[in-house]
Amino acid sequence: MTQIQRLLDANAGYASARANVHDARPSRHLAVITCMDARIDVFAVLGLHLGEAHVLRNAGGRLTEDVLRSLALSSHVLGVDTVVFMQHTKCGLAGVTDEELAALTGADLGFLPIHDQAADLREDIDVLIATPYLSRITTVGGFVYDVESGELDGVVRWQRP
Ligand SMILES: [Zn+2]
């Protein structure tokens, strides 16, 4: 339980010192989809602050059904019009297969492993663009974050015509 207690202790200091954001709508009309990898400090990497963006994270930073669900709400209810996908180097989902991950986890889920980062980013962006209920999203970017150098590679930029 030490781990849990550390979190509660840390919160005691946080609550009294935090900045309060009243508006639930991201002020930069932005959603970032990225990997759950513990080496990525999303707000620091992209120069974002509290209240400015939705951050949707999962293994690989892929466009899953649940990310689509969140983006439907982001764009229709909370004013998001820009989406950035940020995959990264040394990702645990790169260079593995669904079969290997199913054997490793005992779960047959369709893990969306990454074979070719640029192609997979492009594929996720194409699906987003073609999803009718996401038509309010007008700008999409695709980046690869280098976990060693801290730098971003801009792979894809798209603007709705
Ligand atoms: Zn990753």
Image: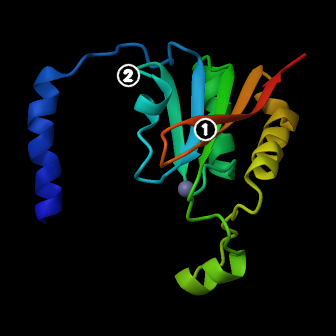
Relative image position of residue 109 (x, y in whole percent)? 66, 72
Label 1, secondary structure: give it.
Answer: helix
Residue displayed at 25% across by 17% down: 19
Relative image position of residue 116 (x, y in whole percent)? 77, 57
Numbered mark located on residue 50 in the image: 2
Front position in the image: 42 or 29: 42
Mark 1 or mark 2, which is nearer the start of the sequence?
2
Location of ligand 1 given as a quarter of the image? bottom right
Asked whether, in this view, residue 4 is left or right of residue 27, the answer is left
Q: Position of residue 158 (x, y in %)?
A: 81, 25
- Is residue 105 in view from this perspective? yes
Q: Amino acid at mark 1?
A: Ser
Lateral position of residue 95 relative to residue 44, left or right: right
| Viewer-side label of 2, 1 | 2
Instruction: Give x and y (percent) for residue 141.
Output: 71, 30
Q: Quadrant of the N terminus?
A: bottom left
Relative to 140, 130 lies left or right? right
Give the residue displayed 51% in from the left and 30% down from the top. Answer: 54
Disc 2 crowd rating (10 Å Cα; few below 14, some 14-19, many 20+) is few
Residue, disc 1: 70
- Picture quadrant where residue 80 is located: top right
